Structure formats: structure tokens, C-alpha cells
Image (cartoon, rainbow, N blue to C red):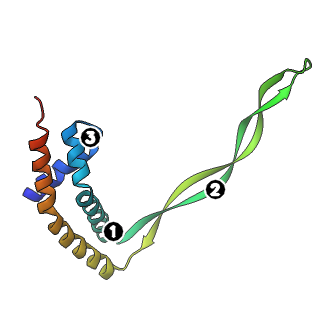
Amino acid sequence: MSRNLTLTALACLALAACGTPQEQCISRNTDEYRTVARLLAQVEGNLARGYAWDERVVTRTDFDFCPTLVRDLDGEDVLVHRSCWRDVADTEVFRVPIDPVIEQRKADNLRSRLAALRPDAERAVQACRAAYPQEG
């Protein structure tokens, strides 16, 4: 229960990283803990699904209207839009097979790392709350 409350508090504060001085202090001092927690959640999701997600950038050609400078009859530059083909980069998400034994080993290692980081993260949160009390 305490772990869930700590994770929830850290996640809420991470969302408001550009917020109050207290929130900035907590965000700054719990970065590694939050990163390990995010990685653990990702690995646990992979185990639950049976596969991982990955991304790749795919380039495709798209029809568009491109701005072009042309000279009118008086010799003045005029901006016109002409049809053209442009390369567009899209991000494609795809499934990647996993080895459950390796993923489980990753999850176990991340859990132990998270447990080792938890006391320092909790101390940092308490120190930041003491240094920057919230005004109510």
C-alpha cells in the first residue's frame, strides 16, 4: 500500500514538473526512481501481453500544396501555392516477440533496483516537502 501511494504521489508530481518549487525539487531528486518504475511497468505490460511494442519511422510520399515564389508581369515576387509531392515521416508502431524468461529476469532486476532506490526517493520527497512547504 505504501509503495502504491509513493508511486502515485511521484507520478502526480512528475506531471507537474514545471509547477511549484516543491514539485520541481521532487521531480529533480526522484528522476532515476521514476525512470526505473516506468521501465518496470513497460516490462510487466510486455509480460502480460506476451509481446512488446516498438516504433519505426516510415517515409511516404503525400500530395500537398507547396508555397512557391513567382514573378508577376510587373516583376514583383508573389507567393503562390502549387501542387507538389512531399515526403512525410510517420511513426509506425508494431509488435515485437519477447522471450518471457528474459522479460521476467528484467522485471525481477527492475523490482530489486526499485526497492533499493525507494528509501532515497522517499527521503528526497520528505526533504523537498520540508524545504518548500506548500502554501494552502
Which mark is in front, 3 or 1?
A: 3
Mark 3 and mark 1 residues within 8 Å of each other at the beta carbon: no
* Residue under the point 71% across and 46% down: 86
Return the residue at label 3: 16
Query: Which mark identifies residue 59?
Result: 2
Question: Mark 3 is on which residue type?
Answer: Ala
Return the residue at label 1: 46
Residue 64 shows up from this direction: yes
Question: Mark 2 is on which residue type?
Answer: Thr
The image shows residue 71, relative to residue 82, as above or below, that is above
Residue 1 shows up from this direction: no
Point out residue 89 in the picture as x, y percentages from the top left corner. Answer: 60, 52
Q: Residues within 10 Å of mark 3 (few under 14, many from 20)?
A: few
The image shows residue 62, relative to residue 116, as above or below, that is above
Q: Residues within 10 Å of mark 1 (few under 14, many from 20)?
A: many
Point out residue 6 in the picture as x, y percentages from the top left corner. Answer: 13, 53
Taking depth in this image into account, of 128 and 16 the one nearest to the observer is 128
Residue, far top? 74
The image shows residue 89, relative to residue 71, as above or below, that is below
**Residue 13 occupies quadrant:** top left
Mark 2, secondary structure of its residue = strand
Residue, far front? 131
Taking depth in this image into account, of 49 and 16 the one nearest to the observer is 16
Residue, far bottom? 101
Earlier residue among tags 2 and 3: 3
* Residue under the point 77% across and 26% down: 79
